[in-house]
Image: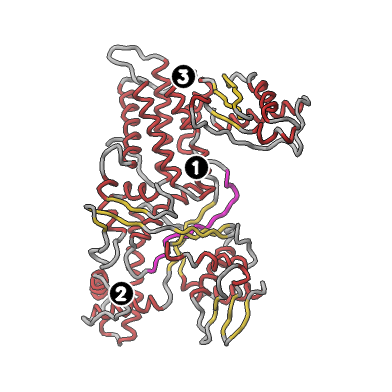
Amino acid sequence: MTPEQLAEKILQALAALADDGTITVEGGLPRELKVERPKNPEHGDYATNVAMQLGKRAGLNPRQFAELLAAKLRDDEAITAVEIAGPGFINLRVAADAQGKVAQSILAAGEKYGTSDSLHGRTINLEFISANPTGPLHLGHTRWAAVGDALARVLTAAGASVKREFYINDRGNQMDRFGASLRAAANGEPIPEDGYHGEYIAELAQRIVAEVPGILELPADEQSIAFREAGYERQLKEQQDQLEHFRTKFDVWFSERSLHEQDGVPHAIQKLREQGHLYDADDALWMRTTDFADDKDRVLIRTNGEPTYFASDAAYYVNKRERGFETCVYLLGADHHGYVNRLKAIAACAGDDPEHNIEILIGQLVKILKGGQEMRLSKRAGTIVTLAELVEEGGVDALRYTLCRYPADSPLTLDIEEMTKQASENPVFYVQYAHARLASILRNADDLGIKLDEFDPGLLNHEREGDLLRALAEFPRVVATSAELREPHRIARYLEDTASAFHKFYDSCRVLPRGDEEVEPVHKARLTLVSATRTVLANGLDLLGVSAPERM
């Protein structure tokens, strides 16, 4: 029995009490409620505070209300014990056969177990990384590559329609400086002081010279443009390839240039003007963002007629909404706190609800330790540690899991040696090893000719079996909560707790027969539980973009 199924039984019991006139609740009965697992297992399998929520509205003190509800619940064969604690908490114990059916439902659902429709109907645009195509992806991008992709997977599992989007900052001064830097490197000249430095510039310049015949014969201005465009194409492709290798995929690669080339900016300005929040002053066009908690009004069009970066931001938001996205989620780096109010002000100025139609998540800085020292320098980029180097040092699985394991809004220090250690104190190894151990048990069962067919769920009555079943039953709720709160780290922590519950079960309950022992019904029941646990761990790891190894 899952927590949701138990909650439904409680709702049915409440409805029965209301139907026969035993209780009358002012405002009516709730349509849904949650049951929780008590912190102390001695208090029961699950608990609910519904009597404390409804007692006063029914004209009863909570404990009286709880007594009435408990009497009704005791009639249910799936519930073996109902106890009232404190001012009106109801503690419940579930029958073994009812609890054991969780394993059955998990195997029936397979890869779909854990999914829900809690966000069904929500259309979400999830934008993350959005780096300039002027250099390698670095450590800050790597955190969002892992967390953003995991969040997209979790939101999708909760029933939302999600588009992963990468906003390519391919317009403006940084692109011109990039082209000038490549041209200088190709001609053996010093890189401009405000240009891009690092070995990758010289490497990329040499590659362009080899692949674009005649580029060095162009006039200087044309050379810079040619190098800019050739460098842009190759650097973007490198970023895309690295992200693909890191298992981070995007549905849309959106070019900032397209907003200007396809009249996206004028269109957005006209729409915003119609909302009444634009004004002209000092020969420039402004948006009155201070009406919506921004610290100052923002310029859209400069006195020289050129649009600002803020104009691109505004046009991009309008474009997203016109593509049909109900909610636009931005994942931004630690240096972008100042963007929160201005982006929300854009949504408000466009006539939207800034508390519903736009969300901004800020990720904090990450430090990487190697040999006890912070990694600061890159072999290719000079002053930044790149995604490619991090993957080379730590591996995709270890890096993704570890970056997803912590709340994104907290600073993070990772140790390469600890992250890649093959020991139980390393969380990613601990969870993956549990999956591999489960797979090994199932292979051994297959070698013994034991088939997973019908089993008696009532045989899963050991304390450790109950603990594991209740952990598995929590998975859908954990996924839904992770999606609702935009916190994929909850998946990682859940997997570690569930792996621990499995190891305790395996240490206490013999799964396979020994020697010449006959295959008993209890062996099949426990193998079913093993298979269900393997499914849940695999599904959870997949939500983090981490592999579930069959052998380790």
Measuring 48% from the left and 27% from the top, which residue is drawn there?
A: 41
What amino acid does circle 2 point to? Tyr
Mark 1 lies on residue? 479
What amino acid does circle 1 point to? Val
Is 127 in the magenta? yes
Residue 335: quarter of image: bottom left
Q: Return the residue nearer the eye: 295 or 80.
A: 295
Q: Is residue 199 above or below residue 326?
A: below
Query: What label sits on residue 196 in the rendered view?
Result: 2
Measuring 29% from the left and 47% from the top, which residue is drawn there?
A: 419
Q: Earlier in the sequence, mark 2 or mark 3?
A: 2
Label 3: element kind: loop
Expressed as whole percent of the image width and height from the top left, the position of residue 540 reads: 42, 40
Q: CA distance from mark 3 to mark 1?
A: 27 Å
Give the residues drawn in magenta, as a range. 118-132
Residue 552: quarter of image: top left
Query: What label sits on residue 461 in the rendered view?
Result: 3
Expressed as whole percent of the image width and height from the top left, the position of residue 399 reads: 33, 50
What amino acid does circle 3 point to? Asn
Residues packed near mark 3 inside 10 Å, few (<14), some (14 to 19) or many (20 plus): some
Expressed as whole percent of the image width and height from the top left, the position of residue 49 reads: 62, 33
Q: Is residue 155 above or below residue 388?
A: above
Q: Is residue 325 above or below residue 548?
A: below
Is 282 in the magenta? no
Expressed as whole percent of the image width and height from the top left, the position of residue 9 reads: 63, 28
